[in-house]
Amino acid sequence: MSNSAKNNAEIVRCSWAGNDPLYCDYHDMEWGVPLHDDQMLFEFLILEGAQAGLSWITILRKRENYRKAFDNFDPKVIVNYTQEKVDELILNEGIIRNKLKITSGIKNAKAFLMVQKEFGSFDKYIWSFTDGKTIQNSWKNLSEVPGSTPESEAMSKDLKKRGFKFVGPTICYAFMQATGMVNDHTTDCFKYKEL
């Protein structure tokens, strides 16, 4: 059992984390922590797109399956996926078997590599939407947190212009929250002060 699962009763977390050990670990170790690793940023971009219309816990439970199915989110491998590979992924019960979401992963890999080539890293590009630093919010409760912001709208518009798919303003904002571009831990959450 993880440390966070053992200490659930003692720790105040964002209300969305609930009591699921997987969700608590994700909340405690990853969500909102500034992320600057290109491959991990790509993973979150693909997973946030896969989540569209679903709950994040659904994706989180399938994350390891996604890593196996999508070659550990290596964009240089994914960009070369064939129709045969797409057909194989559509049959893979361990992931969300939505053809549009699967093919968007390939398109996003291509666009991602183009951004890396232009900016030197995806990290440098994506963090430019927050001037390279975390936006510190101070929400008292979950109901105050917006679904999108001017920054996520600008990010969405630019990503779409570059050929990315499943990158609407709400998906972009969820991506920003997950990768620590914004600190949306509620003020009573132990992670709020840490970040």
Image (cartoon, grey):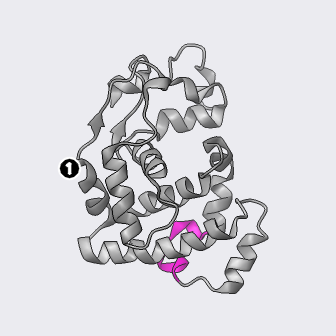
Residue 149 falls left or right of residue 64: left
In the displayed structure, 161 sits above or below 26; it is below
Does 77 appear in magenta? yes
Q: Nearer the viewer, residue 141 or 47?
A: 141
Residue labelled with disc 1: 131
Residue at 65% x, 32% y: name it: 21
The residue nearer to you, when weighing 192 against 167, is 167
Residue 1, image x, y percentages: 67, 31
* Residue range of the region highlighted in magenta in the rendering: 70-79
Q: Quadrant of the C terminus?
A: top left
Tally of marks: 1
Q: Residue drawn at (28%, 41%), measured in percent from left and top?
A: 134
Across and down, in percent, residue 137 comes to 32, 29
Dot 1 falls on a residue whose secondary structure is loop
Amino acid marked by disc 1: Asp
- Nearer the observer, 147 or 123: 147
* Side (left or right) of 84 relative to 185: right
In the picture, measured across the screen, residue 102 lies left or right of residue 149, that is: right
- Neighbor class of circle 1 (other Cα within 10 Å; few <14, some 14-19, many 20+) is few
| Residue 183 position within the rendered picture, expressed as x and y whole percent measured from the top left | 35, 34
Q: Is residue 139 above or below residue 33?
A: above
Measured as percent of width and height from the top left, residue 44 is found at: 49, 55
Q: Can you say whether 128 is above or below 18 in the image?
A: below
Magenta stretch mostly in which secondary structure? helix
In the rendered structure, the answer to whether residue 85 lies left or right of residue 14 reads right
Q: Which residue is outermost to the left? A: 131
Residue 87 in view (yes/no): yes
Residue depicted at x 61% and y 69%? 70
Q: Quadrant of residue 64?
A: bottom right
Magenta-span inclusion, residue 113: no
